[in-house]
Amino acid sequence: MPMKKFINKPENLTTELLEGYCAAFPDRVKLVSEKIVMRAKPKAPDKVAILTIGGAGHEPALSGFVGKGLLDASVVGDIFAAPGAPKVIEAMRLLKRDAGILFVVLNHAGDVMSGNMAMEMAKQEGIRVKMILTHEDIAPGANAPVEDRRGLVGCIPLYKVAGAAAEAGKSLDEVYAIADRFNNNMATLAVALKPASHPQSGQEIFSLADDEMEIGMGQHGEAGTGKSKMMSADETAVKMLTQLLAAVKAKKGDKLHVMINGAGATTQMELFIILRKVKMHLEANRMKLAHALVGEYLTVQEMGGFQMFVAKLDRELLKLLKKPSNAPYWVTR
């Protein structure tokens, strides 16, 4: 079946979507040098900057979270592809400051390679930057080596706690320590019901039968923990949540942040039904749903399914999650 998408030339997809995105929010973001999205009103140079990188095709992530209280800049690659190191170091030069830069990278091979190369360049140029790698996907196992665990939607609440700490004037070491604490207490699982297509080629990026689902699916259709027959919302929620709670070592009395992140073609109705069961299960186990987000934050084109994210919170992390922010896709007042 031919691809049906409102696009122009496939090779211009990333440039055109970023031009449109920045045109929609000109008071909050601006496009610099084609594929760098920055805050329209820069943060004071005496505060730590927060930078991230990633491929296009996952909108609103990652550039949707550039704004006050979150990211200072996002470097965008082509569809499902990491940006090159030259573009990353260009963004670092734009953000260079005595306070330093926290550089958040999701654990995918291309992003890690570009990130490491840019870090070497930054060191040679005297740019003060610390890199943190998100790796919260537990599909390979909660205790699997870091290099085998993908970075999924957990980067977004990590931007929030790090961004809030930076806005408060904390040092680079302090911002890094907060982000690292959050990073070490979070976990994500994805479930897929139907595939997405690559918008440049029209090819489906994986396949599932009409009566199948797969838990543990990656952001680009990477294999999960195995296909199964369709389960109900409640069955799916409990199966995923049980694994996530074990991964973060949650116990009675803990306060948790939960995100139900739609993959692109799952209705809000379904996502809210999932969260309903999550709350019921937590309460039954005497845990508290202290902060929740439901919606599309990091998508995979028209993939059917969602990512369930859980983070264990202490008092400081919960406070930072609730601090004011004004990015196009995360506004907190």
Image (cartoon, rainbow, N blue to C red):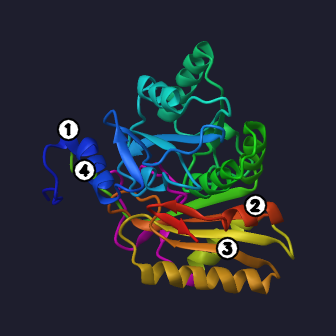
Classify the position of the C terminus by image quarter. Answer: bottom right
Q: Does the segment drawn in magenta span residue 219? A: yes
Tag 4 near tag 3, CB within 8 Å = no
Disc 3 crowd, CA 10 A, few/some/many (<14, 14-19, 20+): some
**SS class of the residue under badge 4?**
loop
Residue at 82% from the left image edge and 66% from the top image edge: 315
Task: Give the Cα separation between the discs numbered 4 and 3.
Answer: 34 Å
| Above or below: residue 290 compared with residue 331 | below
Disc 1 crowd, CA 10 A, few/some/many (<14, 14-19, 20+): few
**SS class of the residue under badge 3?**
strand
Residue underneath mark 3? 291
Residue type, numbered disc 4: Pro
**SS class of the residue under badge 2?**
helix
| Label whose residue precedes the other's in the sequence (2 or 4) | 4
Residue at 34% from the left image edge and 72% from the top image edge: 210
Residue underneath mark 1? 11
Classify the position of the N terminus by image quarter. Answer: bottom left
Location of residue 112 in the rendering, given as x and y in whole percent from the top left corner: 55, 32
Question: Which of pointers 1 and 3 indicates the residue nearer the eye?
Answer: 3
Q: Which residues make up the magenta segment? A: 205-234
Location of residue 18 in the rendering, given as x and y in whole percent from the top left corner: 30, 47
Residue underneath mark 4? 199
Tag 2 near tag 4, CB within 8 Å = no
Judge whether residue 314 can be spotted in this image. Answer: no
Tag 1 near tag 3, CB within 8 Å = no
Tag shown at residue 68: none
**SS class of the residue under badge 1?**
helix
Location of residue 9 in the rendering, given as x and y in whole percent from the top left corner: 14, 43
Residue underneath mark 2? 317
| Above or below: residue 28 compared with residue 246 | above
